[in-house]
Image: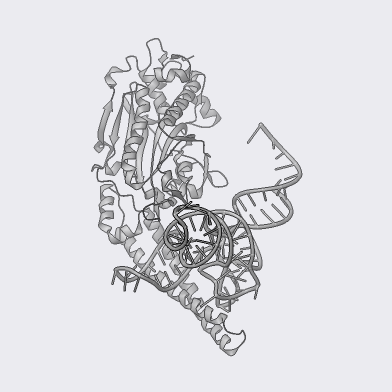
Amino acid sequence: MLDPKLLRENPDLVRAAIAKKHLEVDVDAVLALDAAWRAQLQEVEGLRAAQKTANTAMAALPKGTPEFIVKVAEMKAVSAQAKEREVKLKETEEKLQQAMLSLPNLPHASVPEGRTPQENIVASTHGDPAKVGAHAKPHWEIPNFDKLFDFARGAKVTGAGFPFFIGDGAKLVRALLHFFLEEDGKAGYIEVSPPIFVNAASATATGALPDKEGQMYETQDRLFAVPTAEVPLTNFFRDEILDEAMLPVLRCAYTPCFRREAGSYGKDVRGLNRVHQFDKVELLKWVHPATSYAELDKLRDDAERLLQKLELPYRVLLMCGGDMGFAQAKKYDLEVWGAGQKRWLEVSSCSNFEAFQARRAQIRFRSKETGKPELVHTLNGSGLAVPRVLAALLENNLQADGRVKIPAALVPYFGKDYLVFA
RNA sequence: GGAGAGGUGGCAGAGUGGUCGAAUGCGCGCGCUUGGAAAGCGCGUGUAGGCGCAAGCCUACCGGGGGUUCGAAUCCCCCCCUCUCCGCCA
């Protein structure tokens, strides 16, 4: 959510932001609602002030005196009016709240103009796609692929997109997660194992609700299976005021992630490219506003280092205004090269939300300078998501004999040099 | 899941339906005192919103939501959470 004062005082900034993100939002309608809300608020507060004054006077009066009885009658009318106006005020307030939630975060000045994924800027490329995967195939075409990654039985037991990981397949998932968590720990992130269901309030605070309601799995008591650890992690400090000295707070969490992905289809859903349940380690930062862009660069570097250590070619995209998402102020995507599919696969998305999430979740710190609470900036990124990293490893490192070479950094976690499809 | 007890400011803890945004204590900040410190004394110490150039004024908030009432921290209803006991359980 945006600062209501910013909207009031600088609506053109908001209009420019909406244009840069290529969204359609009627800013004037929001402004009109805000004006109406303020007028109604003043009216209600005036009535309440009158009530309070009268109540104080009545408290000093002996009950039952004619004077008292007259006052009661008089205040009955005021009370009725106040209640009626209050109902209207609440209605307006709710509409205003909804309208405010429809306003996207302001993209940072360094975010490139553009509407489509093609207009994202390739900020850097690491490793040479041409030099890997001499024997590459799309991972789902690797002989005996289904011995380690059993989609058919997963579909039988649960449904499409819920594969079984077996033998070296399961072991490689576990090795990757362990590797990610250890490396993230070395980079300063405290490991957290959060609940993997969240309530509606938490889902709302990060923006998963209401916009993505249909994309989450929901239980009978309105808990949501987390689509990412970002949700429970960000909510950890919801409605809290932190010590400035605590900042920055760095945390990482492994969770399975659940996404319904209703309506998705086509080639990008083949194999491990898109599944309904997958494992991911998420990186989270709560930082002082003055440092958030430096922290974003570091966060991205932390995620990149994992790919470097796995010796996977990847590129970094700086997302353009139209492709970066509603809540982000700036976002980088990390894409790993899948030599078999001959395409880039997104494995991490590193974003600075500035105060957008923090305002919605009311996460603040007490400023040493002013002594007053201020909103923190929140950032997050994957570090990393398993299935596509796995896909790239399988494709890029496939040997002529059908085995998959395990990168040196992962060998201590995997326990051997090659994965075997048997 | 069943029975009971409880949720009040940073913490502890009071609060006959009417100057209660809330006593008191602790903590914290500033000042006095001191060679310095402690003790002591004095003053101050929540959050959010609206109005105002500002000083400031106003409103809301006692787990959450509704209700009764001229007036609710206080009475009624629903929900959530914590604790104790019982049941069930990896």
**Which is nearer the eye, A179 or B41?**
B41
Q: Position of residue A203 (x, y in %)?
A: 47, 47
Q: Is residue A235 visible?
A: yes
Please, which residue is most extreme toward the top here? A401
Q: A283 left or right of B11? A: left
| Horizontal and vertical percent position of residue A70 | 55, 87
User: Residue at point 37% right, 23% down?
Assistant: A309
Q: Residue at x 44, y 69 (%)?
A: A88
Image x and y of residue B65, in percent: 54, 61
The answer to whether any part of residue A327 appears in the image is no
Q: Quadrant of residue A396?
A: top left
Instruction: Tell me if residue A1 comes above or below residue A89 in the rendering.
Output: above
From the viewer's perspective, is B70 left or right of A15? Answer: right
The colour mode here is one colour
- A59 left or right of A94 in image: right
- Indicate the quadrant where residue A270 lies: top left
Where's residue B11, x and y in %? 57, 54
Marks counted in the figure total 0
